[in-house]
Image (tube, rainbow, N blue to C red):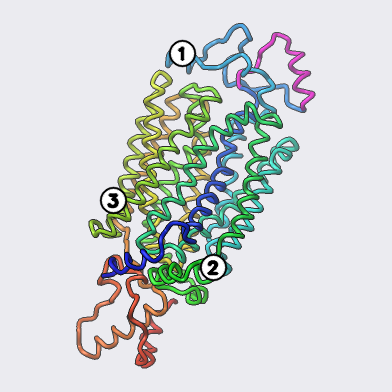
Amino acid sequence: MEMVGSKDVLSKAPAFCSQRWNLAILSFFGIFIVYSNRVNLSVAIICMVLAPSVNVTSDHQANDSILATHGLATKVTLAYPDVTADNLAADDRIGESGCTLEITKSSLSVDAGEFDWDKGTQSRLLAMYFYGYIFTQIPGGWLADRYGGRLVWGLCQSICALSSLALPLAARAHVYLVDALRFLLGFASGVAFPCFYAMMGRWAPKLERSKIMSFCFTGLSVANVLTFPLSSLLCVYGFDNGWGSIFYLSGIGNLVWVVVWFVVTADTPAKHKRISEAERNYIQSSIGDTPEDKEISPTPWRAIFTSSAVWACTVALVSSTYTAYTLQTSLPAFMKEVLNFDIKQNGGLSALPFLCESLVTVLMGQVADRLRERGILSTKNTRKIFTIIALLGSATCIVSAGYMDCSQRAVAVFLVCLSLSFLGLNHAGYAVNHIDLAPRHAGVMFGITNTAGTVSGMVGPLVVGALTPNGTAGEWRHVFYVCAAVSVVGAMVYGIFAEGELQSWAAPPFVQQVVDYQSVKEVDNNENRTHPISQCEDASPGDVTTPTPRKESSSVSEPQKDLNYK
């Protein structure tokens, strides 16, 4: 009955040019910018640091003079043996695989980089983003629920833009200033996903959740697809010594998004000035919530922290993001150290896996909603199946990629592409499950789960740096073992404890009132006590569209008080 009714209403509120899809498009670009700012340093840092095999002339005094004029250290720790312009000596790692390093004379110039940062420093700079990012997850969700995701996300992205624009100047002043800016960038970016979830909890109709959320999440894959190759090209051909242009363009693009965001979006359908009446009614009747109810509702902290379904989402998110963050921050290094791709090849091939992930993400969002709409799978089983396949499939592929060397480059790239393609299924799995469980508190709840997930971003680059001091294929194999082990644990926990229905502690007030009235009436009639919400696995506020609190409900105020938020 609900399905048919939803379709009838949907015909009056088409998706094309609708405000809910305008919000989805702006959210797509917002996520794109967040991830672009996160990963652009992964490529830029290859161009920023001094080339590893840097002894291109026999005149050491001349080299020292050149380095001194740029304020750089003259003592360089070499990752490769010393070479000259006329002779390249293969190192042990290349000799083991029988491959030759694809590198040119020009790429060995001391001018290829400005900074003498060792591998530990580079890993710290990549991880510093996540040290800031972790602090604003829960506050970001709470602020979005109280003051609106539109304002909080827009203001914080302005800070991100300024941080990106200032990074080249900071890098040339002192490396600790880069640490500070990366921390600030992560701190401001931390509110992005909680704000996004808070707004989608108010805007995404029940049977469109998978497709809308999957489309928005494609922004992170597209960010990797475009950021890696464009950053690689800018390293070589851009202004301000190449790498500087990466951060200037990121900052400018971020500022443009902020302006459009404030002009186009609104926190709720009720507050949007250009939304049609049909679309407003469709969204609110589907979600079964009003902005007034949502704004005055207290956050059920205890219920959230004691919910096994919430913890299942948390473990699945940690497992998935560990592999994703590891590849996002370290894939260019793997391409260079194990597969021996030069910087131009590196950018394009590092982007290819994320292109595959974005295509799978969009497709699976459509498939998941179609399966649910036709009643083939329940919401709970849809989320479980997609998440388990994503985690186990990714684990298998990433371990297999670790056994490839530069003589099997094509197979290695294919396996990495397949691994991230499997992860794309997560966006129709646990990623949207937060809104299934508690659409009214999705921002806060995702802030909690993503706080745990952010630990993956903090730990991942450090684990890579610790396990790959020499960058050999065997060392990278250990990195991928860790990714696979974490994924298997996540699949097991989510498969056991995940849920798909609206949780009783997350029901809007009018649903609670109907529940209270019906429950008390059943007791008076000596009937079997049954919670109405639990009768339907996929029940949501949208499932209760016609019942309204009766006048008699005032006589059952005490039972209602017991079921309300605590």
- In percent of the image, x 65 and y 48: which residue is there? 161
- In percent of the image, x 57 and y 56: which residue is there? 135
Q: Please, what secondary structure does the residue beneath circle 3 have?
A: helix
In this figure, which residue is indicated by the disc labeled 2? 272
Pinpoint residue 274: horizontal percent, then vertical percent: 54, 66
Dot 1 or dot 3: first in sequence order is: 1
Side of 374 where 190 appears, left or right: right
- Residue 110's disc is none
Dot 2 or dot 3: first in sequence order is: 2
Residue range (magenta) = 52-70
Residue toward you, 511 or 88: 511
Tell me which amino acid carries mark 1: Gly
- In percent of the image, x 44 and y 38: which residue is there? 355
Q: Residues within 10 Å of mark 1 (few under 14, many from 20)?
A: few
Q: Is residue 306 visible?
A: no
In this figure, which residue is indicated by the disc labeled 1? 95
The image quadrant of residue 409 is top left
Side of 152 where 288 appears, left or right: left
- Residue 385's disc is 3
Tell me which amino acid carries mark 3: Ile
Tell me which amino acid carries mark 2: His
Task: Please determine whether, in this image, residue 29 is positioned above or below residue 169.
Answer: below
Spatial CA span between label 2 and label 3? 36 Å
Task: Please determine whether, in this image, residue 194 is positioned above or below residue 283.
Answer: above
Side of 82 where 439 appears, left or right: left
